[in-house]
Amino acid sequence: MVPTRSTSVQTMVPPAPWEEQLLSQFSEHVEGEGGLLREYADLASRSPEDVRYLINMILEDETRHHRLFQEMLNRVRSDVDFRDYDPKVPYLQNKPAHRADLLEATERFLEFERED
């Protein structure tokens, strides 16, 4: 088994070009964003309360965004490498039994937001 250069995937079957591209883009994004998150936290720690409040709101969103990209990376790595990398984005499943409940709830939530 030979790891690919940009993704640390270890499998006997090489990734398809589109998988390699996704792995590379997700990996670069996750690595680059890690530094940005540390900079946000550092700036927040030395800012006055009002600025710190706003920076922490941004940092919460950026942290969630970072986690999503890590989970997408782990999903692709798991599929390519035939190993489990957690946490990862779950597969979308077609579950007709839940479709009506989800649609009703979504319409109710949207209506509330429209009226708000």
Image: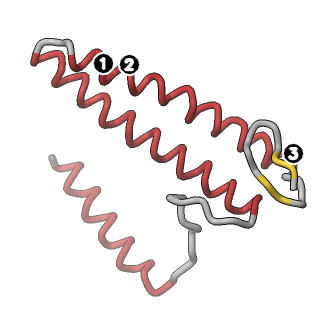
Residue at position x 74%, y 66% in the image: 82
Residue 70, image x, y percentages: 54, 46
Task: Count neighbours of disc 3 (C-alpha within 10 A) and say few if under 14, some if 14 to 19, many if 20 or more.
Answer: few
Identity, as a three-letter code, of the amino acid under mark 1: Asp
Cα separation, mark 3 vs mark 1, equals 38 Å
- Rounded to the nearest angstrom, the CA distance separating label 3 from label 2 is 34 Å
Judging from the image, what secondary structure is the residue with disc 1 in? helix
> At x 76% / y 59%, what residue is drawn?
80
Quadrant hosting residue 53? top left
Image height check: is 12 above or below 51?
A: below
- Residue where numbered disc 1 is placed: 42
Label 3 sits on residue = 17
Q: Which mark is residue 2?
A: none
Q: Nearer the viewer, residue 59 or 7?
A: 7
User: Looking at the image, which residue is at 80% across and 44% down?
Assistant: 20
Q: Earlier in the sequence, mark 3 or mark 2?
A: 3
Which one is nearer the viewer's eye here, 22 or 9?
9
Q: Which residue is mark 2?
A: 39
Question: In this orientation, which residue lies closer to the viewer: 64 or 9?
Answer: 9
| Local SS, label 2 | helix
Nearer the camera: disc 3 or disc 2:
2
Gap in Å between the C-alphas at discs 1 and 2?
A: 5 Å
Contact (Cβ within 8 Å) of mark 1 with mark 2? yes
Residue 28: x, y in percent? 64, 31
Position of residue 44 in the picture relative to residue 28 (left or right): left
Q: Is residue 27 above or below residue 35?
A: below
